Structures are given as structure tokens and as C-alpha cells.
Image: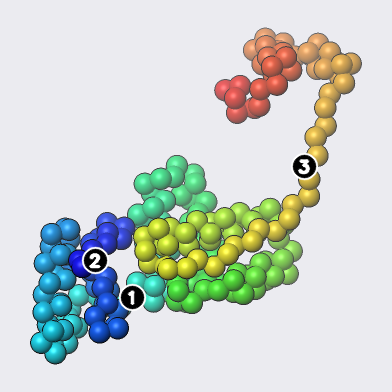
Amino acid sequence: IMTVRKIGDQFWVDFTYDRIRYRKRSPENSKKGAEAFEVVLRNKLTKGESADNKVNVVDQGEQTFETFAQKWIETYAKTNNKISEIERKKQCLKKHLNPFFGKMKLNKITGMHIEEFKAKKMNEMLKNKSINNFLNVLGKLLNTANDWEILEKVPKVKLLQLPPLKYDFLTKEEGKLLLDDSHGVWGEIMLTAMTTGLRQGELK
């Protein structure tokens, strides 16, 4: 059975022969090219020859977190996120995730490592919300590696608990005073917000 996979923007062959798994990037980046490449590899194995070649023969899961993170920014973030979000992810990786996970092999990161990362950031007196932002980036990166069939299993990323949000509502008297002191465009914005309940971003 032909087993051709497209991981990211590259075609790979992924098959088992004599209970050994072979996962290699096709030298010709197309489905037909990968299928032909698999036939060549299987023929070599049938003849007792080595399947090693100059193509990348290392399982992609063996690459370091930092190496994959750079590829993730270039191929996933830059095609799916706004510029501000790309920059936020870059800073998160540079200042927090890469210093901790950077040298680890992608497929060796465990739930325990993630818990150790959380403990380290808490010891640095960072707020739970900030740590959760880092964990969200980490989780998205690992899940993307799984989607691209680089990771077979993704460790669970558990977010920290956050205190309930507090809301403060204006009384009728406070609302009237605010409107009395707001004039022109700002007065119209205040009135619209108070009568419709629209959020700040929705008023633009």
C-alpha cells in the first residue's frame, strides 16, 4: 500500500517494511514523485540494500523545539495571523518558550516539562494570565506539529486558573453625569454605548 503524506508544504513517504518504519522526504515535491520514490525505496529494501540516501532521513519529531518553532512562525503564523499577532508569538518564543524548551527534541516534550515551565514562570512572579498566553502559543505550536503529522501524540497543556472578572456598572446618576460632560462626537459615542451595550471595539 502506498503511503504518501503531505506535511506542511513537503511530500513524504511513510511506510513500514519488515517491522521497521521508514519516513523520508521525497526529493521530488509532488504526490507522483513521492509515490515513485517509495517504489524505489521498497525495491532497494527487497534487494537487501540500504534505504539511506541524501534525503533527510531523520524523523521530523527529532528536531529541536527551537528549529520547529522557527518553521512554524514562517509557515503557519505568517499565513494565518495578523502582523501584531505574529510579533506577539515571536516575542513569546524568544523570551519564554525557547529559553526553556528550545534545545529539547520536539517528540520528547512531556506534560511534566510543561508543568515545570509553568512552575518556573510562577516563581518569576508572572501573572497567571501572562503564563496562560505563553501556554496557548505552546499548545497551538504542538497541535500544529500534530496536524502536520510530525508529532503522533501531543502532551496536554493545562491552563492556570484565573480569578473571575470583575465588572463595575454605572448608576443612572453616574450615566447622566457622564453624558452631561460629553459633547460632540464623544457624546454620541457615549450615548450609543450606554443605550446599546456595544463594546469599545464594536463602536469603531
User: Where residue 145 sits: x, y (%)?
Assistant: 41, 62
| Residue at image point 15% right, 65% down | 35
Amino acid type, residue under disc 3 in the picture: Leu
Q: Residue furthest front?
A: 1
Instruction: Give the residue pinned by disc 2.
Output: 3
| Residues marked 3 and 1 touching at CB (< 8 Å) | no
Amino acid type, residue under disc 1 in the picture: Asp
Secondary structure of residue under mark 2: loop
Q: Is residue 162 left or right of residue 86?
A: right
Instruction: Give the residue pinned by disc 3.
Output: 165
User: Where residue 82 sits: x, y (%)?
Assistant: 45, 42
User: Where residue 169 sits: x, y (%)?
Assistant: 82, 27
Secondary structure of residue under mark 3: loop
Q: Residue furthest bottom?
A: 48
Which of the two marks, 1 or 2, is nearer to us in this view?
Answer: 2
Closer to the N terminus: mark 2 or mark 3? Answer: 2
- State the residue in front, 33 or 109: 33
Instruction: Give the residue pinned by disc 1.
Output: 59
| Residues marked 1 and 2 touching at CB (< 8 Å) | no
